[in-house]
Amino acid sequence: MKKLIYLFCFLFCGIIVSQELKIADVSFVGAKKTKVSFLKNIVPITPGAVTDSTAILEAVNQLKKLPSIANAAFQLVNNTVDKAYNLVFTVEENFTIIPFANLYTSSNDDFAFRIGIQEFNFTGRNITIGGFYQKDIFNSYGLLFRAPYLFSAKAGLAVSYNNLKTQEPIFFDNSTADYKYHNEAVEILGLYQFNQRHSLDLGMNFFTEKYNYIRGATNVNVPQALDVNKFSYKAIYKYSNIQYHYQYLDGFKSTLNAQYVHSSTKELDNFVVAFNDFVYYKRVGERGNWANRLRVGLATNDETPFAPFSVDNNINIRGVGNIIDRGTGSIVLNTEYRYTLVDKNWFVLQGNTFVDAGTWRNPGGELDDFIDSDNLRVYPGVGLRFIHKKIFNAIFRIDYGYGVTKNASKGLVFGIGQYF
C-alpha cells in the first residue's frame, strides 16, 4: 500500500511539475528521535510559501542526505483554505549509534585494528560525536564533534582531536627505513552550506609531528629523530549533486581539499598540498551501480622522504599494501561496478568488481614521473559489501586486489563504508 502511495505522489508530481503550489502547512511523519523542529529548519519550504514539485523533490533529497534519515517521501494534501496544499514529508529513520571495527595489517604485516563508536544524531539534530581506539603496534585514539547545523540551517562547526602513533616506512636512496610516527592534532573547522550543492569548510589544524628511527637504512641528510610543531590553514570546497536511494547513488560530486602547512623547523619546509576528488555514480538497471573516483593531487615539490602523498591499501589502491611509496603528486582512478545480489527489508548483499590505477611524482621529481612505468600501479579485483539499510553507514566491505604491473603484490582490504 505504501509503495502505491509513493507511486501516486510521483505521478502526481509529473502532472503538476510546472504548477506553482501554495503551501498551507508543512509536517513530518515518522520522525521519532530526530527533532521535528530541526527538520523544519532544514527544509527551505515554509507555510505560506509558493513552491513547485521540483523544489519539493530537492527537499526530499536533502532529507535523504541527513545521517538520521534512511529514506524520505512526500504527499500533497488538498487544503480547502485558499486553494493551498498541506505538504507532508514521510521519513524513515536510521539507527545512528554505531560501533565500528576495522581490521587490517600494519606496515610489517602485524595484526592491527581500530574500534570505536559514533552517534550521528546527537540531541536529535544530526550532530556527530564519537571516538576511537587504535592498536597498530602502538596505541592511538581520537575524538570528534561535528555539528553542520549548529548555528543555523547553513552554518556549523567541527572540532576533532587525534593522538596517532604508527610505524611508518620512509623512502630515500632507493632504500627504506622504519620510523615511529606520532601525530597529535587539534582541528577546528567552520562549516557553511551555500545551498544543497555547494559547501565550504574553513579552519586550522594545530599539530605536533614526531619521527623516531627504529630500523633500516640511514643517511646523514635524513634525521633519525624529529619533533616539530606545525599548523595548517585548511579549506575544503564541495559540490554535490547526488541522488540517494538506500545503497544506490546517482550523480556527480567534487571535493577540493587545500592546505598550507607551516613548520617550526628548517629541516621541514613549509609547503602547500591540494587534491581534488571527482566522483561520478550511475544507476544501471534495477540492481546495478557504476561508481568512479578520479583523485588528482599536487604538493610543493620538495625532495624529502616525508612527502605527503602515499600509495596505500586503505586510501587509494586496494591490494597494493600499506604505505609502499610516497610522492609530491598523485593521480589515481578507481572504478567499480556494484551489483545487489540480495535485497531484503533491512539487509543488502552487494558484489563488486573494480580496477584501481594510480601513478605518482617522486619527491623533487618531474611531471613526467607520472608516465614512468616504475611509478604506475594497476590493481583489478573483486569484493563484497554487507549492508544494513536501517543503520547509517553500516557497510562492511571486503576487497581483494591483484596487481598486474611491475613489482606487484596482492591482498585483502577490509573496511567500514564504501571505498568511495
Image (cartoon, rainbow, N blue to C red):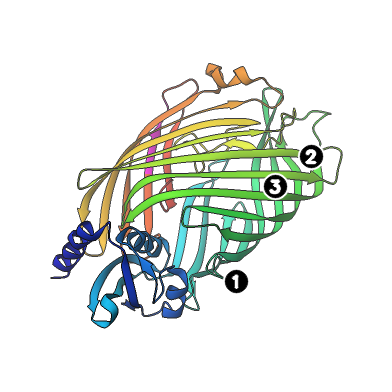
Q: Nearer the viewer, mark 2 or mark 3?
A: 2
The residue pinned by badge 2 equals 270
Query: Who is closer to the viewer here, 122 or 14?
Result: 14
> Which residue position holds label 3?
181
Residue at x 66% of width, y 19% of height: 366
Residue 26 visible? The answer is no
Give the answer, above or below, for where 155 lies relative to 413.
below
Identify the image quadrant of residue 357: top left
Q: Main secondary structure of the magenta part?
A: strand
SS type, badge 3: strand
Which residue is situated farthest in the front direction here? 82
Q: Which residues are magenta?
A: 399-403
The numbered mark, 1 or 3, whose residue comes first in the sequence reads 1
Q: CA distance from mark 1 to mark 3?
A: 37 Å
Left or right: residue 54 versus residue 293 is left
Of mark 1 and mark 2, the one earlier in the sequence is 1
Q: Work out whether 130 lies above or below 296.
A: below
**Residue 41, position in %: x, y?**
47, 73
Q: Is residue 211 above or below residue 67?
A: above
Q: Earlier in the sequence, mark 2 or mark 3?
A: 3
- Judged by depth in the image, the label closer to the viewer, 1 or 2, is 1
Camera-side mark, 1 or 3: 1
Tell me the SS state at disc 1: loop
Q: Residue at horizontal 62%, vertical 25%?
A: 361
Q: Is residue 174 left or right of residue 62?
A: right
400 inside magenta stretch: yes
Query: Which residue is under mark 1?
Result: 151
Identified by mark 1, the residue type is: Phe
The answer to which of 137 and 57 lies nearer the viewer is: 57
**Residue 147 seen anywhere in this rendered image of the structure:** yes
